[in-house]
Every structure is written in C-alpha cells, then in structure tokens.
Image (spheres, rainbow, N blue to C red):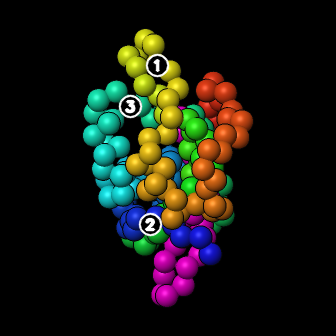
C-alpha cells in the first residue's frame, strides 16, 4: 500500500452548520492545511521559494462525501501524490473518521496545482521544484517516472464540487 502524508484534526463547533454536521467548505480548507503542513515539514525550501517568486495556483478542487462528521470527531486527513507532470501536481485526499479504534472513510477529495513564476501581471508555468518532487516521491500512488510529461489540463480549468 502506498504511503500517505497525514494531519490529524479535531472538528470544532465553528466548523459545523446549524444542523450540526461539518460544513462542506471545511473539507477544502483541510486539504489546503494538509498541503501547507506537508511543505513545512517535508519541503521547507519550497516555502522559502514561495516567499520569492514561486506561486502555487490551485486549478481544481473537488470532494465527494460519504458520511457525516460532527463537532469533536477525530479526523485523519491523508494526502497522496496522484499525478506529477513537469509543471503540475495532483493530490488525492482521504478523510478518515477515527473512533473507538475504527477508521471510516467519510470523504475523498482531489486538488490540482500548477507551479508558476513571475509578476502577477505576467505569470508563466514553471517546473515543479526538485525539492518538492523528491519530497512527494514516498507518497505517490504509483511510481513517479523521471522525465514523465503527461498532457496537463489547461490552466483555465477550475471546478469545485460540494
């Protein structure tokens, strides 16, 4: 079984709606948090590069929901590398409810990012930084082939499902 990068989270009241279940937008927030913590822990030089001119544009985010979770539920957000091209990365996320020794998949998501450089008025695609490529290898759903360059979707693709 491939490895995954994991963050643990305890759901708070502020993340629930009037009915008491988690509001869907929080799943997308947790994707971003997982990605950020991965960079902090596994690829800190990429964070330094982001302070200069590297930009990570989120092109597509999606999430499918299978079960509800509520305040004070313990959650594991597990990120894997799904696809790596020269300029883009696609992650998959499993949201696993942890209770009484059981692990139940409650949602599954995806996120595609593009690496860009340049001023805001003239950004252009750039290669995924080597440190990020290396940091992601242990979390690949399938082996990463050096020099692989599958066709990437156009930058204009932006969708969110909830």
Left or right: residue 5 versus residue 142 is left
Which stretch is magenta?
94-114
Disc 3 or 2, which lies upstream in sequence? 2
Q: CA distance from mark 3 to mark 2?
A: 25 Å
Q: CA distance from mark 1 to mark 2?
A: 31 Å
Q: Is there CB contact under 8 Å for labels 1 and 2? A: no
Q: Residue at x 57, y 51 (%)?
A: 91
Q: Residue at x 36, y 57 (%)?
A: 42
Looking at the rendered structure, the secondary structure element under dot 2 is strand
| Residue 131 appears anywhere in the view | yes
| Residue at image mark 3 | 54
Disc 1 or 2, which lies upstream in sequence? 2
Give yes or no for residue 99 being in the magenta stretch. yes
Residue lying at the far right of the rendered structure: 151
> Hey, which quadrant is residue 10 in on the image?
bottom left
Q: In the rendering, at what x and y percent does residue 20 appear?
A: 48, 61
- Is 66 drawn above or below residue 129 in the view shown? below
Q: Is there CB contact under 8 Å for labels 3 and 2? A: no
Left or right: residue 148 versus residue 22 is right
Q: In the rendering, at what x and y percent does residue 26 appear?
A: 47, 51
């Amino acid at each position: 079984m491939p490895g995954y990068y994991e963050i643990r989270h305890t759901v708070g009241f502020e993340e629930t709606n009037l009915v008491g279940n988690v509001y869907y937008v929080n799943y997308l927030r947790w994707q971003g948090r997982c990605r950020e913590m991965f960079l902090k822990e596994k690829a800190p030089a990429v964070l330094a590069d982001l302070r200069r001119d590297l930009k990570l544009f989120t092109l597509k985010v999606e999430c499918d929901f299978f079960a509800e979770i509520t305040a004070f539920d313990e959650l594991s957000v597990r990120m894997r590398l799904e696809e790596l091209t020269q300029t883009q990365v696609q992650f998959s996320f499993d949201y696993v409810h942890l209770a009484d020794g059981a692990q139940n998949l409650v949602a599954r998501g995806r996120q595609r990012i593009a690496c860009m450089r340049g001023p805001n008025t003239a950004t252009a695609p750039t290669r995924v930084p080597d440190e990020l490529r290396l940091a992601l290898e242990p979390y690949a759903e399938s082996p990463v082939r050096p020099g692989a360059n599958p066709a990437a979707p156009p930058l204009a693709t932006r969708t969110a499902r909830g």
